[in-house]
Image (tube, grey):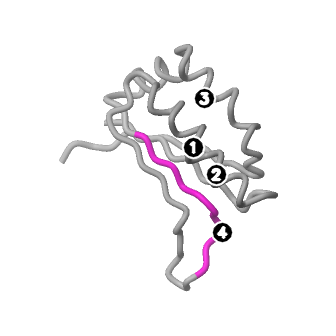
Amino acid sequence: MHKLIALYRQPPNPEHFRDYYVNKHIPLVRKMPGVLRMNYTFDIKDLGGGSPYFCVFEAYFKSAADMGASASSPEGQAVTADIPNYQPGELEIIHFEIPDE
């Protein structure tokens, strides 16, 4: 299993981000091939009650190769091209293999 995480810091316009992300961007992500499971949240807190993040997105793929193929697909390219439309501000994307246990 392979996991991708997108970490969004506070955007310039939180209301626009939330509305666009939920109603336009996530439906595009749902069309990407190879996504086994995905989730996102705006309710992020660290152990002290604050958070450096506004939104966290997670997607699961069978493998790193499947993740790459999904990102390279026309649907994946549409998702990438859509990112500026919700003005995310600072964004960090990480991915990693999840060991079978």
Of the numbered discs 4 and 3, the one sitting upstream in the chain is 4
- Say which of 42 and 23 sits in front: 23
Labelled disc at residue 23: 1
Label 3 element class:
helix
Q: In this view, does 61 lie above or below 53?
A: above
Q: Name the residue under label 3.
A: 79
Distance of label 3 from label 2 (alpha carbons): 16 Å
Distance of label 4 from label 1 (alpha carbons): 24 Å
Camera-nearest label, 4 or 3: 3
Camera-nearest label, 4 or 1: 1
Contact, CB < 8 Å: mark 1 with mark 2?
Answer: yes
Q: Name the residue under label 2.
A: 19
Of the numbered discs 1 and 3, the one sitting upstream in the chain is 1
Going by the numbered disc 4, the residue's amino acid type is Pro
Q: Name the residue under label 4.
A: 52
Camera-nearest label, 4 or 2: 2
Going by the numbered disc 1, the residue's amino acid type is Asn
Q: Where is residue 77 in the image (x, y as percent from the top left)?
A: 61, 20
Which residue is rendered at x = 42% and y = 28% of the image? 64
Q: Position of residue 27 (x, y in %)?
A: 51, 35
Image: magenta residue range: 50-59
